[in-house]
């Protein structure tokens, strides 16, 4: 009987241990992970799906690099600068004086809460929605609010 109980305890401990390992993951629900930041300079790993709304890039002035087929999404405050390149996808909301550069086959969907600018390379796809706009507009040559 004690051997049977030991196996049950071991089995439960293993299941609980695996649950803890998964629970301690740095990924958010949905498979996204936070961007990696050093101060206010942030990046998303190649091929990863990252969010930056709860990172060093969620406040004021910061820079974010999203490249090499990564997917970045989130909101940053005033004077943030986002570079989206290398076939990546960026869905962002930027604050006053924010800027987004979309190049090398990237797709950028940008919402501006105040004045901002978006540069869109000829091989990229970009949309922009300014504060007060009711619809998103395509901006193949870039645009600003």
Image (spheres, helix red, strand yellow):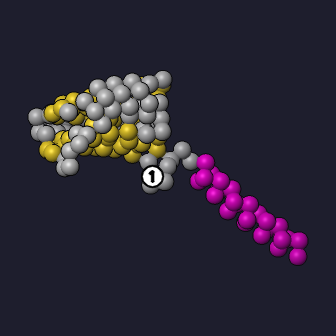
Left or right placement of residue 26 versus residue 132 in this view: right
Residue 54 appears in the figure: yes
Region in magenta = 1-24
**Which residue occupies 42% across, 42% down?**
51
Q: Is residue 5 above or below residue 43?
A: below
| Residue underneath mark 1 | 31
Left or right placement of residue 2 versus residue 52 in this view: right
Q: Quadrant of the N terminus?
A: bottom right
Q: Is residue 19 magenta?
A: yes
**Which residue occupies 20% across, 33% down?**
145
Q: Nearer the viewer, residue 38 or 8?
A: 38
Residue farthest along the front direction in this orientation:
132
Q: Is residue 104 above or below residue 14?
A: above
Q: Describe the element under mark 1 as helix, strand or loop.
A: loop
Residue 144 position in % (x across, y down): 18, 32
Residue 10 position in % (x across, y down): 76, 63
Left or right placement of residue 79 versus residue 27 in this view: left
């Amino acid at each position: 009987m004690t051997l049977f109980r030991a196996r049950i305890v071991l089995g439960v401990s293993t299941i609980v241990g695996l649950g803890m390992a998964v629970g301690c993951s740095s990924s958010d629900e949905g498979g996204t992970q936070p961007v990696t930041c050093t101060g206010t300079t942030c990046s998303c790993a190649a091929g990863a799906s990252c969010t930056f709304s709860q990172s060093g890039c969620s406040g004021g002035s910061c820079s974010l690099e999203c490249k090499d087929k990564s997917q970045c999404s989130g909101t940053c405050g005033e004077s943030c600068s986002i570079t989206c390149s290398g076939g990546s996808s960026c869905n962002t909301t930027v604050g006053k004086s924010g800027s987004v550069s979309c190049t090398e086959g990237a797709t950028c969907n940008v919402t501006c809460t105040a004045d901002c600018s978006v540069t869109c390379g000829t091989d990229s796809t970009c949309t922009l929605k300014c504060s007060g706009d009711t619809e998103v507009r395509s901006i193949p040559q870039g645009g600003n609010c």
